[in-house]
């Protein structure tokens, strides 16, 4: 049994050779035999209630207002307008210190957007 989600690539079929035990994959044709609509109203069926931990109530909080000026972003080859620590926007673990006027480099051979995160 395979559970497939709409819009997700389907897996290939796997065959295990009985003689040598090798695994072979091949394209497969998948057919919908049962559409699971039990969860559409947000409830969990009684027969599955113990499968999932209890859902904690989410308490809404007041939104934090951010002014556009509080986020400083520059692209590769632009000059640093504010000294301090900068991170790559899609790789927040990539941090580097730059001084005022430094030219922002590429990351892993690609142009990126750098975000200023402070003077740390």
Image (cartoon, rainbow, N blue to C red):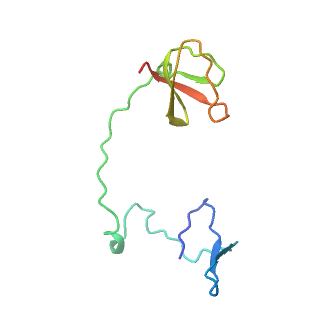
Q: Position of residue 47 (x, y in %)?
A: 34, 75
Is 20 placed left or right of 54 in the picture?
right
Q: Residue at x 36, y 71 (%)?
A: 48
Query: Relative to the observer, which residue lies in front, 34 or 21?
Result: 21
Q: Residue at x 56, y 63 (%)?
A: 5
Is 40 placed left or right of 52 in the picture?
right
Q: Most extreme residue toward the bottom, as rendered?
A: 19
Q: Most extreme residue toward the front, as rendered?
A: 20
Q: Residue at x 34, y 33 (%)?
A: 62
Q: Most extreme residue toward the top, as rendered?
A: 101
Q: Position of residue 52 (x, y in %)?
A: 34, 64
Is 113 placed left or right of 57 in the picture?
right
Q: Position of residue 32 (x, y in %)?
A: 60, 74
On the rendered image, what quadrant is the C terminus found in?
A: top left
Q: Position of residue 111 (x, y in %)?
A: 66, 30
Q: Is residue 34 above or below residue 78?
A: below
Q: Residue at x 53, y 37 (%)?
A: 91
Q: Is residue 29 above or below residue 61?
A: below
Q: Is residue 76 above or below residue 48?
A: above
Looking at the rendered structure, the number of numbered marks drawn on it comes to: 0
The quadrant in which residue 88 appears is top right
């Amino acid at each position: 049994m395979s559970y497939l989600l709409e819009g997700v690539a389907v897996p290939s079929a796997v065959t295990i050779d009985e003689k040598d035990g090798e695994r072979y994959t091949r394209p497969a044709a998948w057919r919908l035999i049962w559409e699971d609509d039990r969860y559409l109203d947000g409830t969990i069926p009684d027969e599955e209630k113990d499968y999932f931990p209890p859902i904690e109530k989410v308490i809404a909080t007041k939104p934090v207002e951010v002014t556009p000026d509080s986020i400083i972003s520059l692209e590769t080859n632009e000059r640093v307008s504010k000294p301090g620590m900068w991170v790559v926007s899609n790789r927040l673990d990539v941090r580097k210190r730059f001084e005022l006027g430094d030219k922002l480099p590429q990351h892993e051979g690609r142009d990126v957007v750098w975000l200023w995160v402070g003077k740390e």
